[in-house]
Image (cartoon, rainbow, N blue to C red):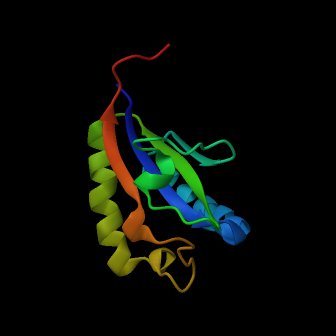
Amino acid sequence: MAYIDGFVIAVPTANKAQFIRHATYTDTLFKELGATRVIECWGDDVPDGTVTDFRKAVDAKEDETVVFSWVEWPDKATRDEAGVRMHEMMDTDGRFDEKHNPVPFDGKRMIYGGFSLVVEL
């Protein structure tokens, strides 16, 4: 059964084009490692909540846009193996070098997690 990695980040709104380039490049690597689908969504209707919300979750600033993304894997085993391979590649594969593909957001404020499907229609 499919397995999903979910991500929420705050990207400086002025960096939208740079984010799209970064995501396209990085998402190609996820696909190479076995992902079946990668979705990147630029927030355009992300309301402020009274207790919590997406913006608070990533401490988004006024000049930042919330991005919601997910990577679909065929199963958790494929995702776990991809994680191992990615860490190995970071030391040996220049495609992970930030000089070639700089990260256009503050990764320390990213929230992420892995999820097992329980309903799929």
Residue 86, horizontal then vertical, whole percent:
35, 64
Residue 39, horizontal then vertical, whole percent:
58, 44
Eyeballing the image, is 8 above or below 97?
A: above
Residue 76, horizontal then vertical, whole percent:
29, 38
Seen at 30% across and 68% down, the residue is 87
Seen at 32% across and 46% down, the residue is 113
Q: Residue 88 is drawn in which quadrant?
A: bottom left
Residue 117, horizontal then vertical, whole percent:
35, 25
Q: Residue 118 is drawn in which quadrant?
A: top left
Q: Nearer the viewer, residue 74 or 24?
A: 24
Residue found farthest to the top: 121
Q: Looking at the figure, which quarter contains the N terminus? A: top left
Residue 29 visible in the picture: no
Q: Nearer the viewer, residue 56 or 119?
A: 56
Q: Is residue 2 left or right of residue 47?
A: left
Seen at 59% across and 42% down, the residue is 47
Q: Nearer the viewer, residue 120 or 11?
A: 11
Q: Nearer the viewer, residue 96 or 10?
A: 10
Residue found farthest to the bottom: 99
Q: Is residue 38 left or right of residue 90?
A: right
Residue 113 visible in the picture: yes
Q: How many marks?
A: 0
Seen at 55% across and 45% down, the residue is 48
Eyeballing the image, is 6 above or below 55?
A: above
Eyeballing the image, is 2 above or below 69?
A: above
